[in-house]
Amino acid sequence: MASDQGTGTANRRTGEHPAECDVTVQLSDCGRDDAEAVFGALDQVFAGCEDVAPHSAAGREPTVWMATFDSSAHSGDADAAPRLSREVEALLTGDHQAVEKVEKALGRLFELRSTQHVPGEHETESRLLLASR
């Protein structure tokens, strides 16, 4: 998983990149392993604006896993498409173009089914179902 490696991560955390490049990814209906698989693959493609390792308190699994990615910081391609134990619901929120970039990256990694797309004036929301290829 991502960690604070070098100054690039520190700079992203202080907001020195355009905010319209940030995409918040929320995963639900999945456990830690599936959340780590999705976030780990996205972290290989885009720089995480925060530590993307899922966290839980007192050993409990959260119902929603969340991370933010900088869509302008394309860092490469994922090594391989990760396996998921089941379908995972994903909610992407951010600028129209930024969400589109993250959605395309997810489409290269997983079987993707769009369940809802809600455009707004400055921001869009995209609900997806992710499954292993």
Image (spheres, rainbow, N blue to C red):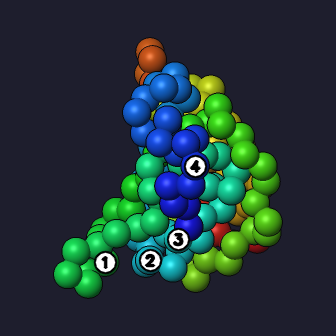
- Give the amino acid at mark 4: Gly
- Give the amino acid at mark 1: Glu
Label 3 to label 4, Cα distance in Å? 22 Å
Q: Is residue 7 above or below residue 131?
A: above
Label 2 to label 1, Cα distance in Å? 7 Å
Q: Earlier in the sequence, mark 1 or mark 3?
A: 3
Q: Which of marks 4 and 2 is nearer the N terminus?
A: 4
Closer-to-camera residue (69/108)? 69
Closer-to-camera residue (66/49)? 49
Which residue is disc 4 drawn over?
A: 6
Task: Specify the quadrant that holds the C terminus.
Answer: bottom right
Give the percent coordinates (x, y) of residue 97: 62, 26
Task: Specify the quadrant that holds the N terminus.
Answer: bottom right
Which residue is disc 3 drawn over?
A: 36
The mark found on residue 61 in the picture is 1
Q: In this view, does 21 lie above or below 69?
A: above
| Tag 2–tag 1 contact (CB < 8 Å) | yes
Q: Is residue 90 left or right of residue 76?
A: left
- Give the amino acid at mark 2: Arg
Which residue is disc 2 drawn over?
A: 32
Quarter assignment of residue 82: bottom right
Q: Is label 3 or label 4 in front?
A: 4
**Residue placed farthest to the top in the image?**
121
Q: Residue at x 60, y 64 (%)?
A: 40
Q: Which of marks 1 and 4 is nearer the N terminus?
A: 4
| Tag 3–tag 2 contact (CB < 8 Å) | yes
Q: In this view of the protein, can residue 52 be seen by the observer?
A: yes
- Give the amino acid at mark 3: Glu
Q: Earlier in the sequence, mark 2 or mark 1?
A: 2
